[in-house]
Image: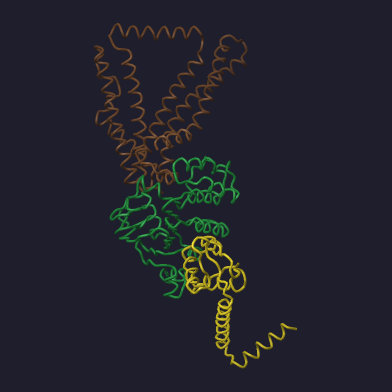
Chain colours: A yellow, B green, C brown
Amino acid sequence: MEWGFNADAPIYSQLIDQIKQGIIAGAFPPGERLPSVREMATEAGVNPNTMQRALAELERDGLVYSQRTAGRYVTEDQTMIESVKKTLAETQVQAFLDAMSRLGFKKGEILELVRRDTAREED
Amino acid sequence: MAILECRDLSKRFGNTPALNGINLSVEPGRIVGLLGPNGSGKTTLIKLANGLLTPSEGQILIDGAAPGKQTRSEVSYLPDRTCLPTWMTAARLLDFYGDFYADFRRDAAEQMLEHLNIPQKQTIKQMSKGTREKVQLILVMSRAARLYLLDEPIGGVDPATRDYILNTIISNYNPDAAVVISTHLISDVEKVLDDVIFINQGQVALQSSVDQIREEKGMSVDALFREVFKC
Amino acid sequence: MLRKLLKHEFRATGRIMGPLYLILLVLSICANVSVRLLGTSGSTMLNIFGGLVMVLFFVGIMAVCIVTLVLMINRFRTNLLGDEGYVMFTLPASVHQQVWSKIIVSTVWSIASGAAVFLAAGITVFRVDYVNDFFRWLEMIFRQITSYYAINGAAFALEALALLLISCAAFCLQFYAAMAVGHSFVGHKSLLSVVFFFVFQFALQFLGLSGAFSFEGFNFGGAAAIHAALWIMIASCAAVGVIFYLITTFMLKRHLNLE
């Protein structure tokens, strides 16, 4: 799994987003055990305490759960994963719309552009 | 208890002040960046922590004790220069470190040497500058110390080695040990740090956590550094 | 910890002194052969060759003496006051242990070099009758001393040995103290070390302690006088050594200034 960070947001919140994406995309499949904090930190090239914080937050949201000694597991609750997916999609769309409106496009124009673009890809 | 603590610490060289009333503390389990422009006093602070210099005023304490014979067995120090005896081979250096430091993990050092393709039979004199730096870092990181003081560990190495070094620091992480990294290459180390201490003209300009800076200021530590130390 | 420091110090110096002694041994054997040939052979070529070997032999002896001195100075300068000082002074060892390891090793090498030169000379002139003569001479001296002055030979030898050891150590410490002071400055470290060496030398002479290093002024009237002279010399060497030791350790502890 690829990790990347931008400059302005806190690193732990970027980690949360990226782990969520990993879960949705299947890099961390439902019900599977997650690597240890240290392994994940090393892989992402981040501080283990930061990774710990991100995982703790995900745990609080219920997306991952820990079993006393066996480590952390991804939730098996498909509806929860779906809802996370939906939330992430909504954020992406919102970001896209914001960027387009900054370029001066109206809602209708944006829709038209998207429709044309997706149609071309299908060809 | 803090593993490293400075109380009103000052150091002068003749009449030139190098550090002026430093107060700070580093807790176990933290990876701390000591950041500042060249000549800001980073190296002086680290040398004081190793007892290579004596404070002019105030105190510096390692695990509650002044630097000395006892604290040195708990501190693993990477100087800002290569200073290994050049006639020694890598293997002999492993003997040397193993002899003097009870916490030296020879197997870990051997593994790292092998990983970086450094032959044990080569003398330091035969090695390139970059390889010498790597050997020195391997020796320092192979100890299970309470406090690692790394003075410019990524200064003179290529980006691939830089990643290897930072990965070594992360994978060596121990909740009982603290790591202090002095550097001016902030963007490279930022992800690895818990806290940062900005030091300027011998004084602490800022002490904060990386996430706090990003959260409150909405900018990276690197960007903040450029703003604080704008010329 | 001192034991470990000594082990590594002997390792670092032995790799230079060992081969040097070996070369001197080979040269002295060659010199022995050429001494025998020089007198007997009629060939000019062989004589020239023999002369050359003798020259080499004397160069070898000088080399052992010079290297012993240079190594004593250089180990302190590079290993403690140079870049290697970053490694040495962050070892879990005290400054006292560091300095003692240097004193002990340098003293051992000085005495070993003296013995090596003596032995090399012995090998060069070796003939069975010489050896017999030497032992006969030694025995005679000893007997005469014992009977004439009623000196306890063993005590005398022990005192001489103690003086040798202590003066060697004090001599090393004069260099160490000079370097420790000289290197505490920001620039011109080596030059200042030399200056301080001579400052110490003058100070010693001024104090009149250097007078105690020679036999002048002592009256060899009896056994007691010789004992007294030896003890005065031992005590003054020890006093000088202690002063230089205190200077060295104080400077290394409080005013260490690695570049």
Location of residue C189 in the rendering, given as x and y in whole percent from the top left corner: 38, 44
Residue at x 45%, y 55% (from the top left corner): B150
Image position of B87 with respect to B180: above or below: above
B61 or C159, nearer to the observer: B61
Residue at x 57%, y 76% (from the top left corner): A81
Image position of B39 with respect to A98: above or below: above
B181 or B100, nearer to the observer: B100
Image quadrant where residue B17 sits: bottom left
Residue at x 60%, y 49% (from the top left corner): B117
Q: Is residue B207 left or right of residue C221?
A: right
Location of residue A108 in the rendering, given as x and y in whole percent from the top left corner: 61, 93
Image quadrant where residue C220 sits: top left
A60 or C189, nearer to the observer: A60
| Quadrant of the image containing the N terminus of chain C | top left
Which residue is the extreme one toward the right? Answer: A123
B73 or A16, nearer to the observer: A16
Residue at x 73%, y 83% (from the top left corner): A122
Location of residue C12 in the rendering, given as x and y in whole percent from the top left corner: 48, 35
So how many labels did they put on this image? Answer: 0
Image position of A115 with respect to C171: above or below: below
Image quadrant where residue C80 sits: top left
Q: Is residue A60 left or right of residue B62?
A: right
Q: Is residue B204 left or right of residue C112?
A: left
Image position of C175 with respect to A8: above or below: above
